[in-house]
Amino acid sequence: EKGTYPHFMLKEIDEQPFVMRNIINKYQNENGKLKLDDDIRKAMTDADRVYIVACGTSYHAGLVGKQLIENIAEIPVEVHIASEFVYNMPLLSKKPLFIFISQSGETADSRAVLVEIKKLGHKALTITNVPGSTLSREANYTLNLYAGPEIAVASTKAYTAQIAVLAILAVDSAHAKGIELDFNPMQELAIVANAMETLCNQKEQMENIAREYLAVSRNCFFIGRSADFYVCLEGALKLKEISYIQAEGFAGGELKHGTIALIEEGTPVIALATQEHVNLSIRGNVKEVAARGAYTCIISMDGMQDEEDRIVLPAVHEYLTPLVSVLPLQLISYYAALHRDCDVDKPRNLAKSVTVE
Ligand code: F6R
């Protein structure tokens, strides 16, 4: 039930700090140690390559997951869109492990891949919000998101839950491989939960940005580099699906290779600048688009901010920045849709769970 909330989407955005804390509790035992099945640990450490397969928002979580698993657990990862994988299967490694990421666990495109790879004798782990779902039942292993039912068609809390669980999985695999880490996922996720709470209390600011930038715009671009780029893809998807504004996420460095031609006087460009190692280059991109008339909005992180930034996110561990940078994008999309009188929870032409290929 929505309770006092006008929409499920807003309620689900607000639930994200609790979801983080729930995940910390579910995946930690009394001694503060990670609690994952031995079978899953073995499947991860036996694999010479992980293939993440998903659609839409879950695919975007997979892109972040690739960075986490490669950096933390040192296992190579490929991320694939399920509907493409099915007829364009890559050359597989000798010992692949498949990870299906699916909020609903019912997505037909992902299921079609699972059926194919099982025929080849490969193992699969499903990360889902619905434990008894088809993808969960048909895979060898399941990790639950513990996000609670997600009702709004636009996925919000499932995305952040997916990334949190992927971070825990990566750390568990690293421990099993004897990799020394100075990253405690539970401590860092607790910091993330607090940061999310702070942002959930800044709704007025997000609403103002939505009104100022998106009340009448035809289009909007999101730019970022490294992990920020992946979040830009998700921010753009959120905005398109609920506000019907043509939105695209671009890698900052790709602008000059074509897309900068789209910038006109007043084109809204939202830039994420939460990655220390590319902070200067993304700010350079912002200057380039601003010089061509773009109406720019920078979202940065504490410690990296500049006076002109519109939102400064509370600092979190560099591995986990997508968990907080996505939140203003979710809220800006929500308020943009609201201002444009769109049906926020049930956007046109879309279904919550896509059970046809
Ligand atoms: C976007 C959205 C969709 C889903 C996609 C996959 O907000 O909800 O893009 O992420 O249809 O769904 P699941 O995760 O249920 O497999």
Image (tube, helix red, strand yellow):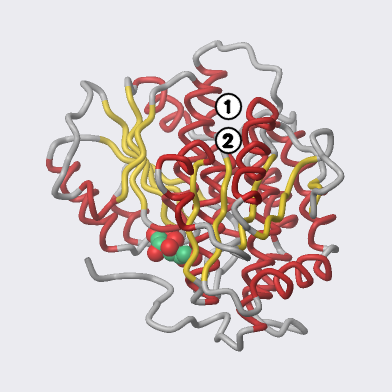
Image quarter of the N terminus: bottom right
- Secondary structure at badge 2 equals helix
* Residue type for callout 2: Ala
Residue 159 point in image, percent of width and height: 55, 54
Image quarter of the C terminus: bottom left
Ligand 1 position by quadrant: bottom left
Residue bearing mark 2: 167
Q: CA distance from mark 2 to mark 1?
A: 6 Å
Q: State whether residue 336 is above or below residue 130.
A: below
Classify 10 Å Cα crowding around label 1: few (below 14), some (14-19), many (20 and above): many
Q: Residue at x 36, y 56 (%)?
A: 55
Residue bearing mark 1: 171
Residue 31 versus residue 175: which sits nearer the camera? 175
Residue 53 point in image, percent of width and height: 33, 45
Q: Residue at x 65, y 45 (%)?
A: 286
Q: State whether residue 109 is above or below residue 338.
A: above
Q: Are marks 2 and 1 in contact (CB under 8 Å)?
A: yes
